[in-house]
Image (cartoon, helix red, strand yellow):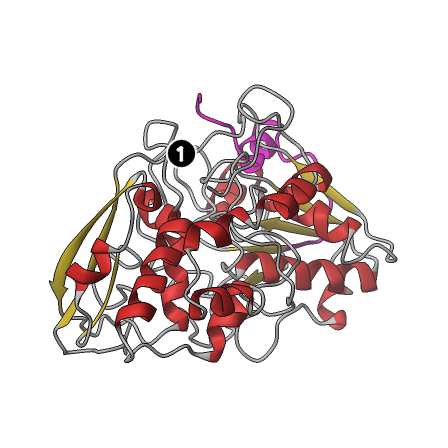
Amino acid sequence: MRAATTGLDRLLRDGAARLRGRHLALLGNRAATDRLGRPILDALAADAGLRPRIVYAPEHGFALQAEAGEAVASSNSGPVPVVSLYGGRKQPAAEELAQVDLFVADLPDIGSRYYTYMATLKACLAACAACGVPVLVLDRPNPLGGVLLEGPVADVFGSDVCCAPIPIRHGMTLGEAALFFRDTCFAGAVMKLEVLAADGWRGGMRTEADGPPWTPPSPNMPTLETALAYVGCCLFEGLNLNEGRGTETPFLLCGAPWLRPEPVLARVSGAERAGLALAPARYMPKALPGKAAHPRYCGSVCEGISIRVSEPRAARPLTTALAIIGAIHALHPELEWLPVFDTLAGGPRLREHLQAGRPAADLVASFEAEQIRFDAARPRLYARDGRAGGRVSGS
């Protein structure tokens, strides 16, 4: 896959003509960079002399200074007011939108339903539709690619970590997600929406050689490897396990003081760990301000499992995570299922199947029909690996 040109780069290449003479609002953060590595506010100011009237920030804040779940305050200290949509409220206020005539969104998403940026965009689309404000989404490639889907289409949705009836690994860019929201969640509303697509992306998974260096879109998403593993390993947050927070490799570890990793790994088959290297690990989560101030089992030695991506295209991290969870459930009565597990999973199906002791492979196979239906109906701004569409598979 050759390096893609993002929607932001296309906008700047055209002299930002779409923005000139407009009163702008911007939804974004510092990870939304151009091909030169400039954050979007700097790129707009330098190339087009543009400054939004108001900036909206998702979880982690515009400067990406806050850890997951931390409420972020709004700020009026800079040249542009920054309004947090992860704290006291989740969408722009009508009186704020009355001051603008174009809402621009550029958020680097990572391709998993749990990631809250998609929910923030959905809330902003609703507010803009209610106020009659047009929306321009500057699109970016999905780093996990646009072909493979993993997980069930959510039965229960509406939370920040499960905002729509889509699979966990959904295969959409943020621009395609915006079109999906328009056509499903807001089908009865009048919504003025334009997506400026990325150029040169054929739906393949991103690699480090495909363009500029990876810019972490949040404090605990340091690498592409992390983003891929997150598809499955985020579910560990719904259990009384440490998911690698408090270490330098979040979502590439899971463990607990009571875990015995060798017997767990013995129950995970080669097919269930395809593309991923699993090994026993011993580690101690520590407080990392700005990343994980209070990780689970902070200061305690955890026996756990190290997860590394050996072959990205073969990896099915959700399958692997479900197999690990099923093995832990079978071997460890200490395992606890927290209410947020079902929220992350989009309903109780995953938990009920694993608690019944049924194989993870059977659970994964049960998703295929709904994935195929979703794949046929979802918006497509891009060919997938050189063809329109492509086989979906969660196995």
Q: Residue at x 38, y 27 (%)?
A: 210
Q: Secondary structure at mark 1?
A: loop
Relative placement, left or right, of 29 versus 136 is left
Residue 116 in the image: state x and y as whole percent.
Answer: 52, 62
The boundaries of the magenta stretch are: 1-25
Q: Is residue 332 magenta?
A: no
In the rendered view, tell whether residue 43 sits above or below residue 93: above
Relative placement, left or right, of 244 versus 160 is left
In the rendered view, tell whether residue 338 sits above or below residue 137: below
Q: Quadrant of the N terminus?
A: top left
Amino acid at pointer 1: Leu
Residue, disc 1: 36
Can residue 43 be seen in the rendering of this structure?
A: yes
Residue 102 in the image: state x and y as whole percent.
Answer: 73, 51
Q: Residue at x 25, y 37 (%)?
A: 310
In the rendered view, tell whether residue 152 sits above or below residue 349: above
Residue 277 in the image: state x and y as whole percent.
Answer: 23, 44
Query: In front: 91, or 283?
Result: 283
* Mark 1 crowdedness (10 Å alpha carbons): few <14, some 14-19, many ≥20: few
Residue 27 in the image: state x and y as whole percent.
Answer: 59, 56
In the rendered view, tell whether residue 1 sits above or below residue 73: above
